Image (cartoon, rainbow, N blue to C red):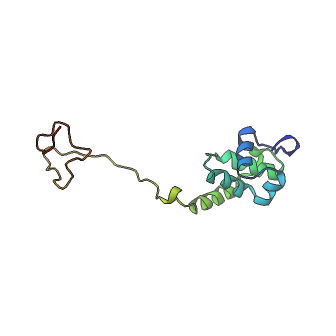
Amino acid sequence: MSGNDKLRNIGPKSAAWLRQVGVRTQEDLHALGAVEAYMRVKRAGFKPSLNLLYALEGALLDCHWQDVPDARRSELVLAVDAAVAQLKPSRGRAAAAVIGPVTYIAGEAEDESAPADSLFDSPDDASGDRED
């Protein structure tokens, strides 16, 4: 968005993100709506805050983003949450789970099924048949 196409509430960084996802004019934004424009930015890999969502809605309503009514903000957040829930995990993989603490127990038997050249073999492993 440049020159006379400048949207209200949209700074240079947000304008660059929007251009990269195909939202270049006020008409583009009106056709998509604030939620879809926000989701395009998010799906493109950028990390927009909810302030962008409110700024887009403010641009549509021709008001400052802080003047978007609280009830409308809540509707927008619910719509974005629903859209985010529909996103597929990136590269077809499930999101990583949180790994809990690992406990090592002294004297626990080693797994003898592991290959001798495992990454976890120590270089001074006396039990292996390897020649160094």
Decide if residue 1 is on the left or right side of residue 92: right
Residue at x 61%, y 62% (from the top left corner): 82
Residue at x 36%, y 49% (from the top left corner): 99
Q: Furthest residue to the right?
A: 4
Count of numbered badges drawn on the protein: 0
Q: Is residue 94 above or below residue 6?
A: below
User: The N terminus is located in which quarter?
Assistant: top right
Please name whichever residue, 128 or 87, is drawn nearer the observer in this view of the structure: 128
Please name whichever residue, 46 or 91, is drawn nearer the observer in this view of the structure: 91
Q: Is residue 18 above or below residue 86?
A: above
Q: Position of residue 42 (x, y in %)?
A: 63, 51
Q: Position of residue 38 (x, y in %)?
A: 68, 52
Q: Furthest residue to the front?
A: 131
Decide if residue 36 is on the left or right side of residue 94: right
Residue at x 16%, y 50% (from the top left corner): 110
Picture quadrant where residue 122 is located: top left
User: The C terminus is located in which quarter?
Assistant: top left
Residue at x 83%, y 52% (from the top left corner): 26
Q: Position of residue 84 (x, y in %)?
A: 59, 58
